[in-house]
Image: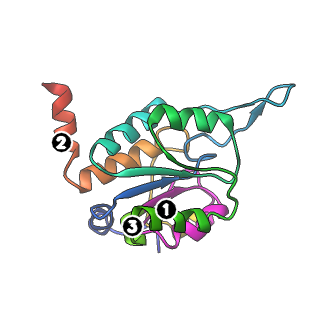
């Protein structure tokens, strides 16, 4: 894998995707962790990422989250987006990934994974389309098929959603629906 694959190869991989799997910290968020004096955790999610997820799901592509940490904020956000495949507290993400493949009856080639750090590599190296956010660690970028131009928590997930929708021929119809 290399982050320098030609766009035609990336589109070919993206055209097969039936499931987009996302890491949370550093992908859906900017990776910063905020805690108040009572230990409550706060996260910031980008609205464009959420809208991209909703649009992608409307095209029939499932979305799942696998996170190494547990967070009530993630549960709330995923519920608001209608994402039912949420795995939290999985530092070793392989079991959750295999469970998704089995339950959705998919092959790894039908899965795109967006990550930013070393915990994501076991899944990225198996997924049909491995995507690194712009501010991912170098080792992850080197092993990704494609890299977003935006950082995690700043619209990177929206870029991944748009890439898949474009490759599958849905994006223009979605834009046109907003124009008419």
Residue placed under numbered mark 3 in the picture = 105
Picture quadrant where residue 105 is located: bottom left
Give the percent coordinates (x, y) of residue 46: 51, 32
Q: Which residues are magenta?
A: 112-139
Residues packed near mark 3 inside 10 Å, few (<14), some (14 to 19) or many (20 plus):
few
Residue placed under numbered mark 2 in the picture = 172
Residue 100 shows which numbered tag? 1
| Cα distance in 3D space between marks 3 and 1 | 8 Å
Relative horizontal placement of residue 132, taking residue 67 as reference (left or right): left
Residue occupying the point 34% across, 44% down: 57
Residue occupying the point 46% across, 39% down: 155
Q: How many marks?
A: 3
Residue occupying the point 21% across, 37% down: 174
Discs 3, 1 touching: Cβ within 8 Å:
no
- Indicate which disc, 3 or 1, sits on the residue closer to the N terminus: 1
* Residue 136 part of the magenta-drawn span: yes
Of residue 52 and residue 39, the one placed in the foreground of this image is 39
Of residue 44 and residue 101, the one placed in the foreground of this image is 101
Quarter of the image with the C terminus is top left
| Cα distance in 3D space between marks 1 and 2 | 29 Å
- Indicate which disc, 3 or 2, sits on the residue closer to the N terminus: 3
Give the percent coordinates (x, y) of residue 125: 52, 72
* Residue 43 part of the magenta-drawn span: no
Discs 3, 2 touching: Cβ within 8 Å:
no
Image vertical order of residue 51 relative to residue 14, above or below: above
Give the percent coordinates (x, y) of residue 20: 42, 54
């Amino acid at each position: 894998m290399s982050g320098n694959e030609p766009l035609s190869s990336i589109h070919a991989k993206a055209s097969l995707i039936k499931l987009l799997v996302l890491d949370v910290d550093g992908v859906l968020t900017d990776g910063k962790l905020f805690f108040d004096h009572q230990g409550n955790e706060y996260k910031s999610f980008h609205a464009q990422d959420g809208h991209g997820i909703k649009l992608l799901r409307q095209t029939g592509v499932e979305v799942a989250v696998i996170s190494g940490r547990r967070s009530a904020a993630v549960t709330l956000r995923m519920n608001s987006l209608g994402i039912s495949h949420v795995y939290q507290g999985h530092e070793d993400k392989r079991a959750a990934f295999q469970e998704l493949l089995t339950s959705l009856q998919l092959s790894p080639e039908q899965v795109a994974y967006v990550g930013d750090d070393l915990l994501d590599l076991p899944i990225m190296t198996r997924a049909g389309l491995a995507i690194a956010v712009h501010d991912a660690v170098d080792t992850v970028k080197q092993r990704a098929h494609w890299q977003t131009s935006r950082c995690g928590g700043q619209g990177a997930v929206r870029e991944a959603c748009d890439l898949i929708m474009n490759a599958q021929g849905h994006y223009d119809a979605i834009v046109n629906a907003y124009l008419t």
